[in-house]
Structures are given as C-alpha cells and as structure tokens.
Amino acid sequence: MLDKQDIELFQAEIKGAKPFVQDRVIAPRSEKKAKMALREIREQEDTLFYFSDEYEPYLKEEGAVKYLREGENPHLLKQLRRGDFTPDLFLDLHGLTKEESKLELASLILACEKEHIYCACVMTGYGSFTLKRQIPRWLVQHPKVRALHQAPKEYGGDAAILMLVEI
C-alpha cells in the first residue's frame, strides 16, 4: 500500500504529462501463416526432388530445344514454336547459379500450378551456355511439364524456353 506522501510525490513528477490514447488494436499473430510458409517450403522441396543433375534425357543438341511428354499431342510443339501460346509468367535466370536456378524453376512450376497458368517462359540467356543446356534437362524430369520449346523471337528466341505446364 502506498502512503499519502508517495502518492503526492508521484503526482508531482507526472504533472503536465499527456495520457496515452490507445486507439489501435493489435491482432494476435496466427499460426496459420507460419504453417502456410512451412507448407510452401515443403512443396518447393518436393518439386526440387525431380531435378537431378545426373539424369541425361535424349534431347537433340543441334537445333532448337524441344520436348514433348509421352502421350501429348505433337501439334503442341508446333504451336509453341510459332508462339501460339502467350506466357503469363516470365522467369529470368541471368546471373544465377545452378542451385539458385533450380530453386527458381521449382518456384515457377509451383506458381503456375497455384495460379492456374498454362504457359511460362524461362529466360536462360547465353553466357557460358551452362544454364541453357541444363534447364531443359531439369524441366523434362518434372511430371507437370507437358512440353517445352525454344521460344520464338518475341519471347527471347534461343535465349529463352517456353513451357506448357499441366494445371
């Protein structure tokens, strides 16, 4: 219990102070966001599972890069080559390492699935041709990639790849 002298001393010290106005409500943090972030990390790791550096698919080294998943309509490749599909997402891999590129590719495929995007463009650039050769090798391993083809000039030409994703 405070005595009268302590109360008077306290009131003398705070004389002229303005009271705080509490006009904001701070919502409690939900665990749902943390769980969603953890789920997205797991999905990305699951997608990365498909990208092996040791797998060597049969892709023609000369000419345009192209791939068609078994059972797909061969006309899809012609449509990709002509630019009949307009990519809704573009991924620029200039300046990234192979490991960073793998993560970005996994994120791109997940984004296509979540946003129901059918066609995406991956810009590999020229550089040392490391990514240009490796990106198609990774993409053909993923079960959601239906087809891919070297992009037409308006989407990057031979420095880019158009891909169709199963949604």
Image: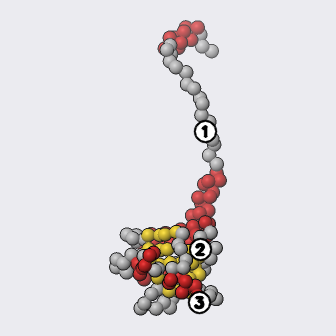
Nearest to the observer: residue 143 or residue 150: 150
Q: Residue furthest left?
A: 128
Dot 1: few (<14), some (14–19), or many (≥20) neighbours within 10 Å? few
- Numbered mark located on residue 26 in the image: 1
- Horizontal arrangement in the rendering, residue 128 relative to residue 104 (left or right): left
Amino acid carrying mark 3 in the image: Pro
Query: Looking at the image, which residue is at 60% across and 54% down?
Result: 34
* Residue 95 x %, y %: 37, 69
- Mark 3 and mark 2: Cα distance apart in space: 17 Å
Query: Looking at the image, which residue is at 63% across and 43% down?
Result: 28
Callout 3 touching callout 2 (CB < 8 Å) = no
Amino acid carrying mark 2 in the image: Tyr
- Mark 1 and mark 3: Cα distance apart in space: 57 Å
Secondary structure at numbered mark 2: loop
Mark 1 vs mark 3: in front: 3
Mark 2 vs mark 1: in front: 2
Secondary structure at numbered mark 3: loop
Residue 48 visible from this viewpoint:
no
Residue that numbered label 2 is attached to: 118
Nearest to the observer: residue 125 or residue 39: 125
Seen in the picture, residue 60 relative to 107 is either above or below; the reply is below
Amino acid carrying mark 1 in the image: Ile
- Give the quadrant of the C terminus: bottom right
Residue that numbered label 3 is attached to: 74
- Horizontal arrangement in the rendering, residue 34 relative to residue 13 (left or right): right
